[in-house]
Image (cartoon, helix red, strand yellow):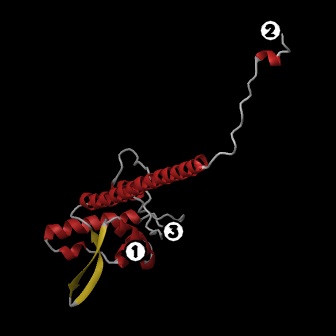
Amino acid sequence: MNAVRDKKIVLMNVEPGLNPGPEELANTILCRTGLLPRKKGATDKMHRVLLELYERSKIAYRQKRLEKAVMTVEEMGAYASISRQTMYDYLSRWTDLAIVAKTSYITDGRVVIGYKLNGTTLESAFEKAVVSIRSNLETTQRFIRELQRTIKNEKISEAQKQNSEGASIDSEEPAEPIPLVDAKISDFDGGNNL
């Protein structure tokens, strides 16, 4: 069997409450796209990272200084109240859906590596996630068609195999023919007419 890639997209059907604020909406968006932590007791502040990425993106495009949109993993972890290593674990899902992109820039003679929102706005970043999810579903649909075709071909092959076996049995010379007996009804009813 082929190895299955371990990317997991978990979509949830969660709705925000009435008159939600930015934090509740950000939390709902992360939950619906499977970007919230899945372990019990994990951080409930991951939405702060999304909001900060958006704020930095706005500032960077307004000032035309794109390096301002970049957040290091340490900064992301601080906003989410988790360690840098734990943030790396969560970032793989964010990059799998193409919501954030890894980038680097040079400042004060040193290279800074971090992540930025993968678009000028939240909407454009999540459009890339929609493309990623749609691509996944289209690939799954292609696998479904292939599965149906394979099953159909196996059944046709099996039916042809059975037909060819049946034809070979019919083509064999039958044993000596069974003679038909001439009999009258009167032979069976003791001579009495019905």
Whole-percent x, y for residue 58 in the image: 21, 65
The answer to whether residue 190 is seen in the rendering is yes
Q: Residues within 10 Å of mark 1 (few under 14, many from 20)?
A: many
Relative to residue 137, is residue 127 drawn left or right?
left
Sequence-first tag of 1 and 3:
3
Label 1 belongs to which residue? 77
Q: Nearer the viewer, residue 2 or 10?
A: 2
Q: Marks 3 and 2: CB-CB under 8 Å?
A: no
Residue type at numbered disc 3: Met
**Marking on residue 193:** 2
Residue 17 vs residue 173, the one in the foreground: 173
Write the residue at 43% across / 50% down: 14
Give the mark toward the camera: 1 or 3: 3
Mark 3 to mark 2 CA distance (whole Å): 75 Å
Residue 1 badge: 3
Who's the residue at 24% across and 59% down the image?
Answer: 124
**Badge 1 element:** helix
How packed is label 3: few (under 14 Cα within 10 Å), some, or many (20 or more)? few
Residue 83 % position (x, y) = 44, 77
Q: Mark 2: which amino acid?
A: Asn
How packed mark 2 is, by other alpha carbons closer than 10 Å (few <14, some 14-19, many 20 or more), is: few
